[in-house]
Amino acid sequence: MNTLGIIFRVSIFGESHGSAVGVVIDGCPAGLPYWHEELMADLSRRKGGILPGTTPRKENDEPAIISGINNNFTTGAPLVISTPNTNIRSGDYEQFSSIPRPGHADFTAGYKYKGFSDMRGGGHFSGRLTWGMVVAGYFARKILSPAIITANLIEAGGDKDIAAAIARATETNDTVGGVVECVVKNVPRGLGEPAFLSVEAALSKIAFGIPAVNGVEFGAGFASSKSYGSIHNDPFVDARGRTSTNNAGGVNGGITNGNDLVMRVSVKPAASTGVRQKTFDKEKGEMTDLEITGRHDACIARRIPVILESAVAIGLADLLMIDRGINGLRER
Amino acid sequence: MNTLGIIFRVSIFGESHGSAVGVVIDGCPAGLPYWHEELMADLSRRKGGILPGTTPRKENDEPAIISGINNNFTTGAPLVISTPNTNIRSGDYEQFSSIPRPGHADFTAGYKYKGFSDMRGGGHFSGRLTWGMVVAGYFARKILSPAIITANLIEAGGDKDIAAAIARATETNDTVGGVVECVVKNVPRGLGEPAFLSVEAALSKIAFGIPAVNGVEFGAGFASSKSYGSIHNDPFVDARGRTSTNNAGGVNGGITNGNDLVMRVSVKPAASTGVRQKTFDKEKGEMTDLEITGRHDACIARRIPVILESAVAIGLADLLMIDRGINGLRER
Amino acid sequence: MNTLGIIFRVSIFGESHGSAVGVVIDGCPAGLPYWHEELMADLSRRKGGILPGTTPRKENDEPAIISGINNNFTTGAPLVISTPNTNIRSGDYEQFSSIPRPGHADFTAGYKYKGFSDMRGGGHFSGRLTWGMVVAGYFARKILSPAIITANLIEAGGDKDIAAAIARATETNDTVGGVVECVVKNVPRGLGEPAFLSVEAALSKIAFGIPAVNGVEFGAGFASSKSYGSIHNDPFVDARGRTSTNNAGGVNGGITNGNDLVMRVSVKPAASTGVRQKTFDKEKGEMTDLEITGRHDACIARRIPVILESAVAIGLADLLMIDRGINGLRER
Amino acid sequence: MNTLGIIFRVSIFGESHGSAVGVVIDGCPAGLPYWHEELMADLSRRKGGILPGTTPRKENDEPAIISGINNNFTTGAPLVISTPNTNIRSGDYEQFSSIPRPGHADFTAGYKYKGFSDMRGGGHFSGRLTWGMVVAGYFARKILSPAIITANLIEAGGDKDIAAAIARATETNDTVGGVVECVVKNVPRGLGEPAFLSVEAALSKIAFGIPAVNGVEFGAGFASSKSYGSIHNDPFVDARGRTSTNNAGGVNGGITNGNDLVMRVSVKPAASTGVRQKTFDKEKGEMTDLEITGRHDACIARRIPVILESAVAIGLADLLMIDRGINGLRER
């Protein structure tokens, strides 16, 4: 169930300390250009070790094309692209099978997979899996062109001064959460299918596939729950559907109305705080102190923007192709 | 794309002023008992006209069994259950094809379906479609038993005194938003598949299929974005995986850990406020005043709890069946 | 799993002696015209009681529109159309729970659904379910226009003189099998996706959903297994891809090449022969004689052509929409 | 659309002359043992260059584990296994873009993918892609144990003396078709869902994903179309559902009855015959003679048995997991 999409189908694979992580894209149109440098520019935005507040684990992230590209164009066959895991220190993770880290999948995956999951580095639950989402997003953006998708970290630790919040967390060896906002300009009108494939349903499903995301909202979102219809509403001001408040976030009835699509996600503080914490030692049968010493992100939200852009691109590309499949081409 | 689920597949159908609305459930186990009164009790919780702040449109909501039940037990064939639309006043809606109501699907559906959609009463985008979700939730709960799923409106217009907020909205002929929280007790451990079928991905997809929901969060949700790892974390306190803060909302790595599952949704104020508002008249090519006079909900969030419970039940039932399919039965 | 299709999704529902049978079509384009008489003409071709060799059970088969059509055009909402079961004689079927009829689903459904399935009249396994396939086919043909889909019973009991074969079966109160061939003219080129959504994979999946079909072949089919490449091959004779033998049946590499698509299905003799046969009486724990006295088809294959046409139309419509979704509109 | 399965999801990828071919298996249970030698034994059965009548192209077919196995057990994460393409002679294929080979996908893929497909060696349409099916079949068999799945080439060129038929084809530099039969013993009872996920629908969909397969039949299949109900029927002879003729091929109403599952496929003669043939030269705009000189299989059907076994295993494993998901574990 690592797959999403109806036509533009994206599957991510890999484990943090396995041989590689990667992505399969099925249903990708033939003839899309692929530029290595352009993709690397996207990938560098999710890399650790560069931005302050991110993990010192550095992977070169170099993509290996396994299938689906020939002479720098997609061929129509499934795109398979992967990158090796090289910078691995598995020793850091040995203790967690009996002493599950709070907030991690150690406990639940151990239960679900009956002890067979490879949880080193977070295993299949690692943020490293988002590498494949960024690769898929690269191609999705080409399908959506000229739509422009931009995400930013707009708040960390409740503070708009994000650098300050991260500095505070780093100083205390702690981690801090944040809010990432994604805005899509030039979004095609009419995207989104009824009910369970509405824009919100489709995009939230992907966004919640990003580790550490625990909230998603569109337009005014949770703020609208405190508001009144006469204030919240988003009146149309021209025949093309432009609106005056965009409280709707570019979506009416689950379908894009052509105004900027606005989506925000809550990113919780990374579970691997350096601050000593409590957990239960299953072997000893008692509470114990846990001090996590591996390499981690003080503000994992710093790395989310390009991942969220990719998630949104993947979802919208699929919706575009579905709409085109049902309704044919049209002037948007 | 009115269908969701991998094994327990739920499809909703109907249009507000068509002949009926209903639901198809495929992959439902044979042998589940069906009690008409029990289902009616669930359905009555989403009915308008009873709770203060809900629409005076009254439908009897009586279910007609079309397929899949014999002698009060499910047969294993697709369950199809519908209810006729009887209390219809289509005249109320005629003007909206050229004068799209802010916040409604009039504009986007008109564009997407090229003028062929039947938008009377909101058409296929009406909240009336949630009738089918409640019916599906009825059977999903039986599959999940002994899990107990309870949702409540915990805030309206930003106020914990909900009756007061609704009274304010009603007085001014306005509408007001709210927050609905759903808690699942006795949730089976180990539910949720990686990435795009995590508990959060699966449930948010369904929740965003409820009209007026524009935000979803799990556990501490957006509040955690303001927090630090040392505070937010959710330490395990016993070998069964009980935790001390439940900030994680019962989910680690997308998989239930056996603690209470906690999910909240933001419900925007119903778009059909009685307060005079602006919109664009496509025929006249100019802005115009719009006064909506039909029967509507002052606080649509009042009707959401049983729908959200149903959404959660549907999603968890599917996850349970998937986990059982892959991993077999087990002591939970 | 009564659903098929990626975009053009068709779900059939109902039980032979339940209140109705019907179909849900999701992903159907808005604006398709619906003419009651035209659909009735299709439906009449699958009706029993008219053609020699078909069951005397007569249903009026009148469609009731539940959702998705307004003013005789599809609205874009899920199409739901059903027809009541009226001509029911359930008494005929009571004995089969303990004495399973050879070739029927009495035994397997009884086991699978733990005794809860409603097997009267074949229940959900009845050929009556194909009513919904014909309705879906009606709309699929409109999407595929100007393609022309025609199926015929080309052989019964191994005999090209079909009337004679049926007469022989009728005389002896027996049933007889047959072969139905479907040909599609003006088929769009380029339909079919790789591997498991090739034209053959997609169409066979649907065709095997027709009760009594136990074989499917394309082009030369099983005859080609006896042949040599130099004889079997299907050379191109012009730049549009016209070929000289059409042994390929209009498909190369799973993709339509624009030549006539040719598909044949084997239809076994209806299991409900009037000839006395043996089966095992589970209650008595011994073999017993069984004489089936209900109303049945001497040559069920007589009713298959319009159903097979519909199956092919449904499959091709979906493939057309998928191709259009991925590759856009194009001159075919 | 290179994916199949509802729970046990198999996706094949690669192009014949790209860097590798492989397979992704999602929804595979954790804890299945993996033995390299055991898998190689399966893979060797589909290899060219060993059996008479198969292509001299020799690949070492050595699997590289990319994800999902740790310490020789599956981890529950997606299994990704690939093998490099090493023995490539791309020069052999250059001419076919303008001179499409009869029976190959040169023409249709060229059209569908607008000239961007990489058709060297048949590209994504190559039989080489079946490598991944055999790998997936390896794991599927473990899930199905103790079911035993065996397929054999039972006829070539219409001759039961298969060696003779292959010798005739080899002598004349021609290719020959054949029939492969697959029998499953100890098949779990109750597998198969209604309509479009019946055993026949599920398995045929996969079988038609094998290049060169152009017909599929179950039990008596096409022979039953020539027969009468009184002869064809398959009476039950005990309470466990054993039958006397197995003309039904182990399936009633699309559900396994516990008798041997019997399926046969027609394999057409490989399109790449060495005999000179005609085709249309698109550049010159005229018919031309074509002589194919690359390395090919005189009797491709020789390599199909292990692939068909794998296809059947994949399909049945998915049906088993679906049934278990819906109905729970049970004594079979």
Image (cartoon, coloured by chain):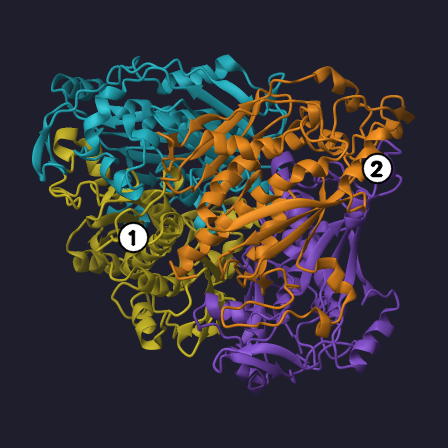
Chain colours: A purple, B orange, C cyan, D yellow
Q: In the rendered image, which quarter is residue A214 located in?
A: bottom right
Q: Is residue A303 left or right of residue D303?
A: right
As drawn, B99 above or below D201? above
Q: Which residue corresponds to the image point at 77% horizontal and 78% vertical from the top-left?
A: A50
Check disc 2 and report its element: helix, strand or loop: loop
* Residue B311 visible from this viewpoint: yes
Q: Is residue D290 left or right of residue B163?
A: left
Q: Amino acid at mark 2?
A: Asn
Residue C267: x %, y % from top left? 27, 32
Q: In the rendered image, which quarter is residue A313 located in?
A: bottom right
Instruction: Name the residue beneath numbered marker 1.
Output: D330
Which chain is mark 1 on?
D
Q: Amino acid at mark 1?
A: Arg
As drawn, A128 above or below C28? below
Instruction: Name the residue beneath numbered marker 2.
Output: A233
Of C241 and A177, the residue lying toward us: A177
* Placement of the N terminus of chain B among the 4 image quadrants: top right
Which chain is mark 2 on?
A
